[in-house]
Image (tube, coloured by chain):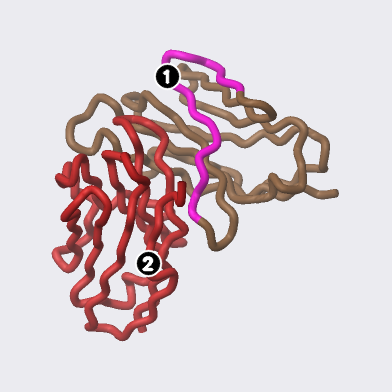
Chain colours: A brown, B red
Amino acid sequence: DQQVKQNSPSLSVQEGRISILNCDYTNSMFDYFLWYKKYPAEGPTFLISISSIKDKNEDGRFTVFLNKSAKHLSLHIVPSQPGDSAVYFCAARDGLSGGGADGLTFGKGTHLIIQP
Amino acid sequence: DAGVIQSPRHEVTEMGQEVTLRCKPISGHDYLFWYRQTMMRGLELLIYFNNNVPIDDSGMPEDRFSAKMPNASFSTLKIQPSEPRDSAVYFCASSLISGGPQYFGAGTRLSVL
């Protein structure tokens, strides 16, 4: 049972426009959410994170929004650039359980393609 | 900072052989994680360590898998004996603090024939 879901396997956006990547989760114990970007043959690279006590976090062109009631978060990239073409993973941490509290649960990723 | 270093980058072996994957975390990071990525299951946590002590190994698929962290700068993930279904990309990651962002290595692509 997937606790973190990214329902769009791929997304194509024109250069300069806004890219919006979505993520849904089912575990209400998740208290910290992260977005990672991954290029082929490389490891995931940390992009931005948000704590469950916030609803928005911004870092340059990247903004993450969290809607706890809907168990939904999104990553906005504005403006989109060719170098943003990559696979984006949403991840979440279950902060309240014992044991694996520091391990992350990942979605399956969305392949973002920025078209010139 | 060299980041998280994994070796080898690629490993091809035959079923039944022992495989050892290696990881050097970022210096000063107290947490080390091993993940596996497959097409079917995506990225899954296998095990993680805090200050060289295994904290949660509930993601380790079978007794054939074992992980050690003999010191703060080195960890191994061993599969013995290996099976074709172990073919995947194995990532190591480290983080500075509990709940902090995790920084990943480039991964080891394992193919078991």
Q: Residue at x 16, y 55 (%)?
A: B70
Q: Could you say which is closer to the camera, residue A114 or residue B77?
A: B77
> Is residue B82 placed above or below B14 in the rendered structure?
above
Magenta segment: A43-58
- Judge whether residue A53 is colored magenta: yes
Given the image, on which type of amino acid does mark 2 rest? Answer: Ser
Mark 2 — residue? Answer: B7
- Magenta stretch secondary structure, dominant: strand
Position of residue B88 in the picture relative to residue B47 (left or right): right
Res. A9 in view: no
Q: Residue at x 38, y 72 (%)?
A: B110
Q: Could you say which is closer to the camera, residue B108 or residue A32?
A: B108
Q: How many other residues sit within 10 Å of disc 2, few (<14), some (14-19) or many (≥20)?
A: some
Q: Which mark is residue A52?
A: 1
Judging from the image, mark 1 belongs to the subunit labelled A
Given the image, on which type of amino acid does mark 1 rest? Answer: Ser
Relative image position of residue A43 (x, y in whole percent): 49, 54
Judging from the image, mark 2 belongs to the subunit labelled B
Q: Quadrant of residue A81?
A: top right
Position of residue B32 in the picture relative to residue A64 (left or right): left
Q: Could you say which is closer to the camera, residue B62 or residue B24?
A: B24
Q: Residue at x 26, y 56 (%)?
A: B74
Q: For the residue labelled by badge 1, is the local secondary structure a helix, a strand or a loop?
A: loop
Q: For the residue labelled by badge 2, is the local secondary structure a helix, a strand or a loop?
A: strand
> Is residue A97 placed above or below A87 in the rendered structure?
above
**Badge 1 vs badge 2, beta-carbon distance below 8 Å:** no
What's the CA distance linking mark 1 and mark 2? 36 Å
Quadrant (top left, top right, bottom left, bottom right) of the N terminus of chain A: top left
Residue mark closest to the camera, 1 vs 2: 2
Res. B80 in view: yes
